């Protein structure tokens, strides 16, 4: 028989991870874990706890084990078919909330968990928000998140701007596409996340080179374009905006003070 306190002391995992795992399995928050440390775990609980702890020790990210990650103060469901939402992306979202055109028609390309689209829709109810993803299983996650959070987002499946009804002329286009270079060593550390959401297996810029010409053709009314990118890609991404006729894009920094997204506003 194992008590809560014994389990917390027994495993070599980070104590914050252990506490979250215990809360997830036993429904006891940190305070309850301290106060009721001598509560005996059922064999079912002990089995689940040890199973999750083992996976965590093998490197599976905690949000996949708990099934949820907070983004912009809201819980988003996650599973290995979507990227885990990053705090850095909240900086992009803050900028969007401030700059998206009033009553605008907006799309988020490669939405994954839907964290950008759902947050923008909830924070700016005047907007009409669409979102797409190539992956059907990612879209299922985005759909579940929008439903759980009460966010009105219309979801469609396909690459970049392709799957949207032709009559829609978007006022704003947003994307956090796969931008890590195919040979970047960081991909090893991210091995549990969907590789196709992280890298284009090339120089990390293919998405921007594909999306911007599409915007030119399909969204002539566009007023705002914003893309997340890697810390060292600001200049290259601004160059791709420029090549496609979108002059004067600016790059903004994330919480870690690294250049993280580039945005263009119609003059
Ligand atoms: N920001 C993520 C990371 O570096 C990558 C996200 C992406 O490729 N869109 O871990």
Image (spheres, rainbow, N blue to C red):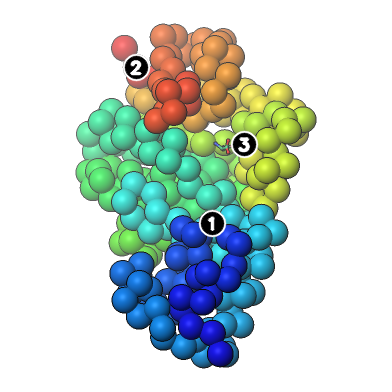
| The image quarter in which residue 58 lies | bottom right
The percent position of residue 101, horizontal first and vertical second, equals 27, 30
| The image quarter in which residue 248 lies | top left
The percent position of residue 57, horizontal first and vertical second, equals 66, 60
Q: Relative to the observer, which residue lies in front, 160 or 39?
A: 39
Badge 1 residue CB within 8 Å of ligand 1: no
Residue at the location (48% across, 47% down)?
Answer: 85
Q: Secondary structure at mark 2?
A: loop
User: Looking at the rendering, in which quadrant would you find the C terminus?
Assistant: top left
**Which residue was labeled with disc 3?**
178
* Number of the label disc, if any, that sits on residue 14: 1
Q: Relative to the observer, which residue lies in front, 46 or 184?
A: 46
Badge 3 residue CB within 8 Å of ligand 1: yes
Q: Does residue 102 sit above or below 34 in this rendering?
A: above
Q: Do the residues bearing badges 1 and 3 touch, measured as CB atoms within 8 Å?
A: no
Q: Does residue 243 sit above or below 55 in this rendering?
A: above
Separation of marks 2 and 1 at Cα, in angstroms: 47 Å
| The image quarter in which residue 35 lies | bottom left
Q: Secondary structure at mark 3?
A: loop
**Which residue was labeled with disc 2?**
266
Q: Relative to the observer, which residue lies in front, 220 or 84?
A: 84
- Mark 1 or mark 3, which has the lower sequence index? 1
Neighbourhood count class around disc 2 (C-alpha, 10 Å): few under 14, some 14–19, many 20 upward = few
Q: Look at the image and tell me whether residue 99 can be seen.
A: yes
User: Looking at the rendering, in which quadrant would you find the N terminus?
Assistant: bottom right
Q: Does residue 23 sit above or below 210 in this rendering?
A: below
Q: Do the residues bearing badges 2 and 1 touch, measured as CB atoms within 8 Å?
A: no
* Number of the label disc, if any, that sits on residue 250: none
């Amino acid at each position: 028989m194992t008590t809560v306190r014994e389990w917390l002391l027994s495993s070599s995992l980070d104590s914050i991870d252990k506490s979250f795992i215990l809360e997830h399995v036993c429904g006891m928050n940190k305070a309850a874990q301290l106060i009721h440390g001598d509560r005996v775990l059922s064999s079912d609980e002990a089995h689940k706890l040890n199973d999750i702890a083992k996976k965590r020790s093998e490197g599976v990210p905690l949000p996949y084990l708990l099934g949820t990650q907070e983004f912009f103060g809201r819980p988003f469901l996650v599973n290995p078919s979507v990227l885990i939402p990053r705090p850095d992306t909240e900086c992009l979202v803050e900028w969007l909330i401030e700059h998206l055109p009033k009553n605008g028609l907006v799309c988020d390309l490669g939405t994954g968990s839907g964290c950008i689209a759902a947050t923008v829709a909830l924070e700016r109810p005047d907007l009409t928000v669409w979102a797409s993803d190539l992956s059907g299983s990612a879209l299922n996650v985005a759909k579940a998140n929008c439903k759980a959070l009460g966010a009105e987002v219309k979801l469609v499946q396909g690459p970049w701007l392709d799957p949207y009804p032709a009559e829609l002329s978007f006022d704003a286009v947003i994307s956090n596409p796969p931008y890590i270079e195919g040979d970047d060593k960081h991909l090893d550390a991210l091995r549990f996340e969907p590789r196709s959401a992280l890298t284009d297996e090339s120089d990390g810029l293919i998405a921007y080179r594909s999306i911007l010409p599409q915007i030119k053709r399909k969204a002539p009314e566009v007023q705002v374009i914003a893309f997340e990118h890697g810390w060292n890609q600001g200049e290259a991404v601004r160059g791709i905006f420029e090549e496609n006729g979108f002059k004067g894009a600016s790059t903004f920094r994330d919480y870690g003070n690294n250049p993280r997204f580039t945005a263009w506003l119609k003059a």
